[in-house]
Amino acid sequence: MSKVYVSNEYGGPENQELITRNTPQPGPGELGVKVHAAGVNPLDWKVRSGVAGTPRELPAPLGEEASGIVTAVGDGVEGFAVGDPVLGLVAPGVGGYAEDTLLVAESTVLKPEEISFTDAAAIPVAGASAYAGTHQVELEPGQSLLINGAGGGVGLMAAQIGRVHKFQVVGVDHEDKRELIESTGAIFVATGDAVAEQVRALLPDGVDVVFDLVGGEALRVVAPLAKNPAHVISAADAATVGELGGQVLRRTPEMVGQITGVVQYGLVDPKVDTTYPLEQAGKALAHVEQGHARGKIVLELITSQD
Ligand SMILES: NC(=O)c1ccc[n+]([C@@H]2O[C@H](COP(=O)([O-])OP(=O)(O)OC[C@H]3O[C@@H](n4cnc5c(N)ncnc54)[C@H](OP(=O)(O)O)[C@@H]3O)[C@@H](O)[C@H]2O)c1
């Protein structure tokens, strides 16, 4: 038996709790994993609210990314053995906020020694999304990348990837994230009425790629700054970006390994802001849901082997 944090209903946070379940056993293509750390993402509260993801059986375990040690290897899985440290995407509906989980082997890689379990837990969703958003439209060094919502889990890693490739990165977010965003080498622009004017002053010919992590009205304000409407990519608002002629973010399983290599060589820091124990998973999720996190929020279950 082992513990998992679930939501008993779709809706607000009041129905979340830590329960005990049978330790999940891997099916074909899956790995059983003792969780050391689990990433907390906006998707988790969107799943709980019923506004994102495929509806799941209740109680619905929460959490989509984790790091830990392999405890069992499912049929057909090659390249992993019991005892391996790994990071990867959680199998649908199994939950990463858990003592034991299942990872999808295709979206899992061995954890390099240089990366702590805590940082590793921020890679499979946020890191791979940052990688996707900075590679979906191919840019040359010197070309411009505007990141809308640059001070969050995905945005801070995307800004650092942009620096690695020598793109001209403009990070848009609230004023209190200025220093954090500037620490990545990006030019900071405060969100609000003056954002378009300020970006046009910096880049009069327009922006080569807009990577949006906010959606809604904030996306509508920055999208026209792109030289080509098709080069607006959103991870946050498929309907609006589609209406504006842009693209939704496309993440592939290989990107988990690609961004892991970049983090391993110290070129990108996952920028973990705050960690919580599993018992405080509700507080961790509220931290993400209420906003103002300065990077990633991660649940730390086992710290001794980091
Ligand atoms: N499709 C996918 O595969 C995928 C994968 C990962 C993430 N996502 C989505 O991408 C979005 C970002 O994820 P994340 O993990 O980076 O979230 P996050 O850590 O909460 O970061 C979001 C950032 O946007 C800022 N922000 C909020 N309103 C803004 C506005 N009007 N203008 C500019 N910045 C604003 C936030 O600031 P405050 O904290 O001050 O509010 C925060 O810094 C979420 O919607 C998430 O669901 C999608």
Image (tube, rainbow, N blue to C red):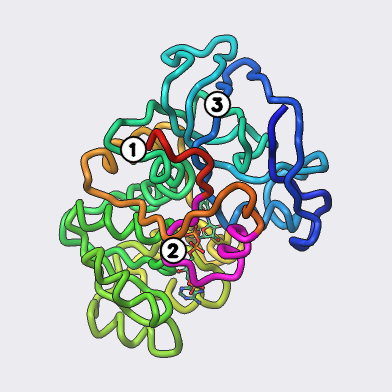
Q: Which residue is at a point 36% across and 69% down the rendered structure image? A: 226
Give x and y (percent) for residue 282: 66, 57
| Quadrant of residue 171 within the rendered picture | bottom left
Percent of width and height locating residue 53:
68, 47
Residue at which label 2 appears: 152
Distance between mark 1 and mark 3 Cα atoms: 18 Å
Q: Which mark is residue 184?
A: none
The local secondary structure at tag 2 comes to loop
Label 1 secondary element: helix
- Mark 1 lies on residue: 260
Sequence-wise, which precedes: disc 2 or disc 1? 2
User: Can you identify the residue that label 3 sits on?
Assistant: 33
Q: Is residue 256 above or below residue 220?
A: above
- Locate residue 237 relative to residue 295 in the image: left or right: right
Q: Which mark sits nearer the N-terminus, 1 or 3? A: 3
Q: Amino acid at mark 1?
A: Thr
The magenta segment is: 283-298
Residue that appears at 44% across and 89% down: 193
In magenta segment, residue 296: yes
Q: Is residue 88 above or below residue 119?
A: above
Check if mark 2's residue and mark 1's residue have beta carbons within 8 Å. no
Q: Quadrant of the N terminus?
A: top right
- Foreground pick, 203 / 281: 281
Mark 1 Cα within 10 Å, few/some/many (few <14, many 20+)?
Answer: many
Residue labelled 2 has its Cβ within 8 Å of some atom of ligand 1: yes
Residue 51 at x, y percent in the picture: 72, 57
| Residue 230 visible at all | no
